[in-house]
Image: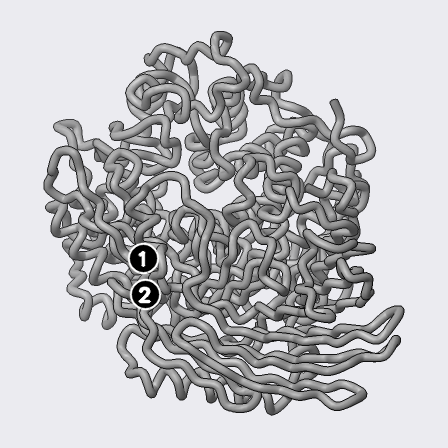
Amino acid sequence: MITHRSYGVAPWALRERHLDLDLLPQSESVFALSNGHIGWRGNLDEGEPHGLPGSYLNGVHETHPLPYAEAGYGYPESGQTVIDVTNGKIIRLLVDDEPFDLRYGRLRSHERVLDLREGVLRRTCEWTSPTGTTVRVRSTRLVSLTQRAIAAVAYEVEAVDGEARVVVQSELVANEQLPERDGDPRAAVALESPLEPEEHFADGPRLRLVHRTRRTGLRVGAAADHLVTAPGSVTTSGESRDDVARLTATTVLEPGQTLRVEKLVAHGWSGTRSLPAVADQVDAALSAAAYGGWQGLVDEQRAYLDDFWARADVEVDGDEEIQQAVRFALFHVLQAGARAEQRALPAKGLTGSGYDGHAFWDTETFVLPLLAYTAPGAVTEALRWRQNTLPAARDRAAQLGLAGAAFPWRTIDGSEGSAYWPAGTAAFHVNADIADAVVRHTLVTGDTDFERDTGLELLVETARLWRSLGHHDPHGAFHIDGVTGPDEYSAVVDDNTYTNLMARANLLAAADAAERHPERADRLGVDDEESAAWRDAAHAMHIPYDDELGVHEQHAGFTRHQRWDFRGTRADQYPLMLHFPYFDLYRKQVVKQADLVLALYKCGDRFDEEQVARDFAYYEPLTVRDSSLSACCQAVIAAQVGHLDLAYDYLTEAAMMDLRDLEDNTRDGLHIASLAGTWTALVAGFGGMRHQGPVVDFAPRLPERLSRLAFSLGLQDTCLRVEIKPRQATYELVGGDSLTIRHYGEPVTLDGEKPRRLDIPAARPAGPPPEQPPHRRPGRRGRHGRRGA
């Protein structure tokens, strides 16, 4: 999108200079505001035209049946779908009885700006009605990062060239009509008027609606309060009915005069509280927000983000698009998790209804590592949500005949929502991904209370699953058979390398944590025999390797499969799963997304540099990147083996996934994991950062297109500042007393008194750059950072 003439590149903002109605669905996603609890898509204030109306509350969903052509034991019975809750964004405008609708009259100018430092969406436009009256409209919208239940809008109408009779209608609207939905018709039914009215209320400037979902029985409340000001007299009236509550304000404006409406909106929901309790909940949140008013919310938002950017900003010199993209990414990842507070972090955040609002392994593998170093409180809450869903995960494991917990492949409420067994239930690696997030969070924060009270239980129950899922062969090797790794083009395989290595780390981490917290481990039923069995399985874990080719196999037997006919595959036949049967994909050497290559990154201490180079060279020509999760991983390993230009191209793909709508589905919501992958590609790729033990390692190296990269990392009680230039890296402790890191394997102790400047060795690529499948090479960047041919 930023290549479209409507958009400009700026370091701290996303600016749309002209309104293009054809881009509305995509812009609604990129301009979305959220705090992890409330999500407001970037719809126009007046509600229409729109691509997809979207107001979401994290966890609010409906269920729908998942019938199967043939019954099978263990199949999930129902799917889960995020629903559009009560819309508090809408402010309609009539000018001399003409509705303010940008499809009619004359739109003289229109600009929207997502301000990444202020955390607000601003809109300014000038419009002449069909009857010739011109008005200037300004609005500012925010979803509060400090007051979890609150969102707000400040809306102004100014008469420009003559007297204007102005009517503003501020509304709460439930059960909005949605665009026709492609795909599963059962999900579409679940989304059709999903809210049953329970209460409507209007009294002066106060509005309230309370509804309940039909199937899941979740009670949803929304309330609004208003402050209306104008130079002359203003008449106001309120009204409500089942699905609409409305405040109407009317005045006459002379040229240069302005009507201003400040609207505070509170959202809340509960699966257990009564109707009066939910109504009181949103009313109380409104009262708290009204205490500081609109300006108080704006000031709090800026202070919150000032603190975040001081800890999280990434500075990129040499490519203005990447600089904008990484800050855009950081902002949206923060929005996804800041106030989720023991709820899931969906793959789209709260920016759209893509993937039905489900959370996947994306959260723990891609999103939480970024948040661990920049907003660790959000990680604590996300992992506590996983702990809260352990009863469902234990039930699922028991249903599958396994011990411990089997976490779902896709879910909203903690139960399995995937109807496709090979890519769902068999993807047990989600257990190890959760365990990895626990270990990383404890390493980064040093929070032993979290490890004892939350982390240990997650580690124990996931370790129990691996011990029961795997088995020792007659020679003592431990195998995990019949699983699906990250690559969904290879399903139900034996000894997936990524899964086995991550399970190995999971088993050892559980045994170690049980030793550190013996009383808590005892309450969880862990004894010395079980802990020893975990260690035995971990040390005996089989890792498939092809001696003839000298590479690790993605799974046992992978390298003996026939290679996919890449030369015979046209460019318009990607993604492959939409043009070829899965059974054919499953039996060929073709990789949807980084799998073995992801293992090289996540489990890098299990490979030497020569192995990493050979494995990367082997899997690059097989990886088609039919998933947005792939490019950032490939960027990291390409940088590690010295292919810096290729790494830069992959970085660009991850960074521009939504800003350029590379997969043609940004309309459904942002790719939060790919956004997080932008940070990963920069910090772990060109920063060479690895954190697989108590000491953080760095092996930085910049591509020639970048002249400088700088970032900060929160590490326990310290804050480390890293600045990388082509020949030198500078490490500075800007908070805390002392920290030891490693630079290219050499220990470096920082004491906070002065930065350490160290030389960067010259890059030595491990062989020629590898080829990618035809039509699947990432787009190349020009020498000055622009997209080349």
Quarter of the image where one finds residue 667: top right
- From the image, tell me which residue sits under label 2: 516
**Looking at the image, which residue sits at the far top?**
568
Q: On screen, 2 above or below 295?
A: above
Q: What residue type is labelled 2?
A: Arg
| Location of residue 63 in the rendering, given as x and y in whole percent from the top left corner | 27, 56
User: For this view, does 545 lie left or right of residue 150?
Assistant: left
Residue occupying image coordinates x 46% and y 80%: 240
> Quick one: SS at disc 2?
helix
524 left or right of 21 in image? left
Q: State the residue in front, 145 or 457.
A: 145
Hey, which quadrant is residue 523 in on the image?
Answer: bottom left
Disc sitting over residue 512 in the figure = 1
Colour treatment of the image: one colour
Q: Is label 1 in a helix, a strand or a loop? A: helix
- In space, the residues marked 2 and 1 are separated at their CA atoms by 6 Å
Report the quarter where the N terminus lies. top right
Residue 627, percent from left and from top:
48, 34
Residue 746 can be seen, yes or no: no
The residue carrying pointer 1 sits among few (fewer than 14), some (14 to 19) or many (20 or more) residues within 10 Å by Cα, namely some
Q: Toward the viewer: 337 or 307?
A: 337
Q: Which residue is drawn at 32% across and 48% down?
A: 187
Q: Where is residue 355 in the image (x, y as percent from the top left)?
A: 41, 46
Q: Which amino acid type is shown beneath numbered disc 1?
A: Asp
Q: Which of 714 and 340 is in front in this view?
A: 340
Taking 96 as reference, is 299 above or below it?
below
Coordinates of residue 90 in the picture (x, y in percent)? 58, 68
Q: 232 above or below 242? A: below
Q: What residue appears at the point 41 percent right and 63 percent down from the top-left corner? A: 175
Circles 2 and 1, Cβ within 8 Å, touching? The answer is yes
Residue 589 visible to the viewer: yes
